[in-house]
Image (cartoon, rainbow, N blue to C red):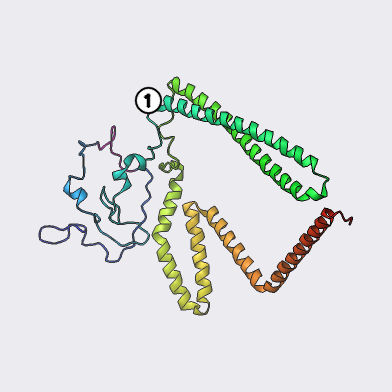
Amino acid sequence: MRETEADGAPLEGEADEPTLAIPFVDYARGDGLAIGPDQEATWSDPLLISESVGWVSTYRGLWGLYTQDPFAGEDAPAGPMFNRDGTVRRAWYDPVGWAGLDKVPPAAEMVDIARRRRHEIGDRRTLLHIQVEEKTAALRGLDLQATSIRNQPHLSALYQQTSHEIDSLSAEIAAMQAEITADNALLESLNRYEDHLLRGEGSPLRAHIRRAHTPAALESTHGSQVAELWAAISVTVLLVAFVLLFYFNPRFLTIWLVSILALFAFIEASVRGTFTRLVGSLATALAIAGTLVLLYEFFWWVAGAVILALALYILWDNTRELSRSRRARGVKP
């Protein structure tokens, strides 16, 4: 919302604003005005706001000029309680969860939680040991049974079933053994961390943050200046290039326009540091397009190869079944 004086005239400096303006990208590098201790500007007395404050809870709109920018480069912010669509912010009704601290235990309870977790894992490991012993005994019985009927043609179906049970049970035991090994390593880590806590050495305060946002390094200032310059001139350069192409060579306008857009995309990715990701995405898209072209051009060859492979598999499976049936009847091949 544009501010005005009492008589309705625009404030000084606003009368010269252009009617049509493209929102500019603001790069926050952390080197601007700082507010706080030992800074030029200090904190004033804090004012606690709550839902009882009228402007906080009753106004769900936006504060300032709504430019309707589809890229949200510059737009009016929402209030502290509501999102841009009028819904309540999670930072308002669940600030601890919004900050990612709901999973971080209080420092006074960390030792007790570590011990409780260690006992739970120890009990689970003991139960796994018991189950492994029981399943190992069952596996040995199945192996003995399979050995006794291995050369009995009239029990071939039972032999196949027993072999399948042996494979399944062996896989279960292997998974349990792997889980026991992982629990042993986890218990060692918990023991070390408990000793770490007992010595009064806590974790870093920002350890729970997975994607921490930090200001850009001073070494990247030059790159930021290039990005700012490109953000300022890119739209103008694109429009001028389009006009020149339309005026001098309209016959190949589509081809040149696609080429210019691709060039702009590469430049944009370069200044934003996403060039590698753009090249990977482009390579993936070209691979998919090439596969679709090959399928379209050689569809019947591909379909014929698939049908031939299916026919050979059916022949092989039927031959194997016939041989198995002959052995079950005691007929020599």
Residue 55 visible, this orientation? yes
**Relative vertical location of residue 312 with respect to residue 178 in this rendering, above or below:** below
Outermost residue, top direction? 199
Residue 209, horizontal then vertical, whole percent = 43, 39
**Relative vertical location of residue 45 with respect to residue 18 in this rendering, above or below:** above
Give whichever of 279, 11 is nearer the camera: 279
Give whichever of 248, 45 is nearer the camera: 45
The residue under the point 25% across, 38% down is: 41
Most frequent secondary structure within the magenta stretch: loop
Residue 97, horizontal then vertical, whole percent = 36, 41
Q: Is residue 200 left or right of residue 80?
A: right
Q: Is residue 314 left or right of residue 294?
A: right
**Relative vertical location of residue 19 with respect to residue 28 in this rendering, above or below:** below
What amino acid does circle 1 point to? Ala
- Mark 1 is surrounded, within 10 Å at the Cα level, by few (under 14), some (14 to 19) or many (20 or more) other residues, namely few
Label 1: which residue? 108
Q: Which residues are magenta?
A: 32-42
The residue under the point 80% across, 58% down is: 320
The residue under the point 66% across, 73% down is: 297
Q: Is residue 86 left or right of residue 242?
A: left
* Quadrant housing residue 141: top right
- From the image, which quarter does the N terminus lie in? bottom left
